[in-house]
């Protein structure tokens, strides 16, 4: 695009220079000083900077007017070189703010009046009128063009944002459909499993048919999952291809926080065991958000991450000692991060408590059930 714009500006500059050179041949017929080699060289120099008018419009405008002043001072016909300054003023008005373009328009009017004084004209009303009208018209057209370009860019941004929202809404609808599909297939599998268990010893044929239904339904559910996830994980989604982080990477996270200047200790109690990927991701994100809040709101504090494995649940807690708290950064209400923590805990049937400690500092404690029985016992409440 830059090369194309530069080529277009070069063509425009060449065209204006050509017209000016042709017009210069009429100077003698108009009672003006005939153009010689010096005048023709100045004509070319006036229009040459216009090649770069799109990249440095204010500088180009200054160069063009400076060369034009030299041309006028030498006693040549000012109208011949007027095309370049006129275009330069329009360019500044169409690309730069008013506090740049208005002085350039004023400069054009001043040089025009100076040209009338040098040529000892008798028609001062015409010169003054042209010095006022030409810059004003060009400046106004340039300002309108700049505002139109800004509105066009804003419209394109709004259209792009609207398109992104529509894509996000469509993916949300697909996710809801995914939930319904999976729920349906799981219901079928659950019913058929109960039937197979009930008739396993008395009616082997019915039990086998139920198992066949479970097998077919499971495969169909997996196919639906793959199709839906292919849509949700579109190439332009920016979703990371790396595995989801889990509790095994808590020490790695703590090391990054330590590098940011906050001392963090990680303590693991109980016997570590594999957990469902969703549970591990939930616990990891809560710890990540809690440590991020320590870095932002209490950069001088010490933080402790404690991970406890229990028979039917896992508990993670993040607490700081409250040193170095920046009051201006502490919100009175819950931010988006705290809301996110509560939503994650609720999604997995866990319990989370967030708030200040009696001995000082702030603590986040999350308890997640690791079995279906424990999950049913939990009510997902948060404090």
Image: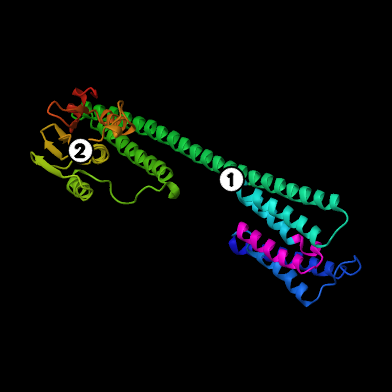
Please say if 325 is above or below 43: above
- The residue that label 1 is drawn on is 153
Q: Which residues are magenta?
A: 57-83
**Residue 115 or residue 186, whichever sits in front:** 115
User: On the rendered structure, is 193 left or right of 55?
Assistant: left
Predominant secondary structure, magenta span: helix
Q: State yes or no: residue 59 in magenta.
A: yes
Rendering coords of residue 147 (x, y %): 64, 43
At numbered mark 1, what does the secondary structure look like: helix, strand or loop?
Answer: helix
Q: Nearer the viewer, residue 97 or 72?
A: 72
Residue occupying the point 41% across, 42% down: 232
- Image side of residue 272 versus residue 93, left or right: left
- Residue 209 percent location from the top left of the image: 30, 34
Looking at the image, which is closer to me, 330 or 119? 119
User: Is 24 contained in the magenta span?
Assistant: no
Question: Circle 2 is placed at which residue position?
Answer: 324
Q: CA distance from mark 1 to mark 2?
A: 45 Å
Which sits earlier in the primary sequence, circle 1 or circle 2? Answer: 1
Q: Where in the figure is residue 221, as x and y percent of width and height? A: 35, 38
Indicate the position of residue 300 as horizontal and vertical percent values: 19, 41
- The reply, left or right, for residue 178 in relation to residue 75 is left
Q: How many marks?
A: 2
The residue sitting at the bottom extreme is 37
Q: Name the front one of labels 1 and 2.
A: 2
Residue depicted at x 74% and y 47%: 136
Furthest residue toward left: 270
Rendered residue at 90%/66% (across/down): 31
Q: Residues within 10 Å of mark 2 (few under 14, many from 20)?
A: some
């Amino acid at each position: 695009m830059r090369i194309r714009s530069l080529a277009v500006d070069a063509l425009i500059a060449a065209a204006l220079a050509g017209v000016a050179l042709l017009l210069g041949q009429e100077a003698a017929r108009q009672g003006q000083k005939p153009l010689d080699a010096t005048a023709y060289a100045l004509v070319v120099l006036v229009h040459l900077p216009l090649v770069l008018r799109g990249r440095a419009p204010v500088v180009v405008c200054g160069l063009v007017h400076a060369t034009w002043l030299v041309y006028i001072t030498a006693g040549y016909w000012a109208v011949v070189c007027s095309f370049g300054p006129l275009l330069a003023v329009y360019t500044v008005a169409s690309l730069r703010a008013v506090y740049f373009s208005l002085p350039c328009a004023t400069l054009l009017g001043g040089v025009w009046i100076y040209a009338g004084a040098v040529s000892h004209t008798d028609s001062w009303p015409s010169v003054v009128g042209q010095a006022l009208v030409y810059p004003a018209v060009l400046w106004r057209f340039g300002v309108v063009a700049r505002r139109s370009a800004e509105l066009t860019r804003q419209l394109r941004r709004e259209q792009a944002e609207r398109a992104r929202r529509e894509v996000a809404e469509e993916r949300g609808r697909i996710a809801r459909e995914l939930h319904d599909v999976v729920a349906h297939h799981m219901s079928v599998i659950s019913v058929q499993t109960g039937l197979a268990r009930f008739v396993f010893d008395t009616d082997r044929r019915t039990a086998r048919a139920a198992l066949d239904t479970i097998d077919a339904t499971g495969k169909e559910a997996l196919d639906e999952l793959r199709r839906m996830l292919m849509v949700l994980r579109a190439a332009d989604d920016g979703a990371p291809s790396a595995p989801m982080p889990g509790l095994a990477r808590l020490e790695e996270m703590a090391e990054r926080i330590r590098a940011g200047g906050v001392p963090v200790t990680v303590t693991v109690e109980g016997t570590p065991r594999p957990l469902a990927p969703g549970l591990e991701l939930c616990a990891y994100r809560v710890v990540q958000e809690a440590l991020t809040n320590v870095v932002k709101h209490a950069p001088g504090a010490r933080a402790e991450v404690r991970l406890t494995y229990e028979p039917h649940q896992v508990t993670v807690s993040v607490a700081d000692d409250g040193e170095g708290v920046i009051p201006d950064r502490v919100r009175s209400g819950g931010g988006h991060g705290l809301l996110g923590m509560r939503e994650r805990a609720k999604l997995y049937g866990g319990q989370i408590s967030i708030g200040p400690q009696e001995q000082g500092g702030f603590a986040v404690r999350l308890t997640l059930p690791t079995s279906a029985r424990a999950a049913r016992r939990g009510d997902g409440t948060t404090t």
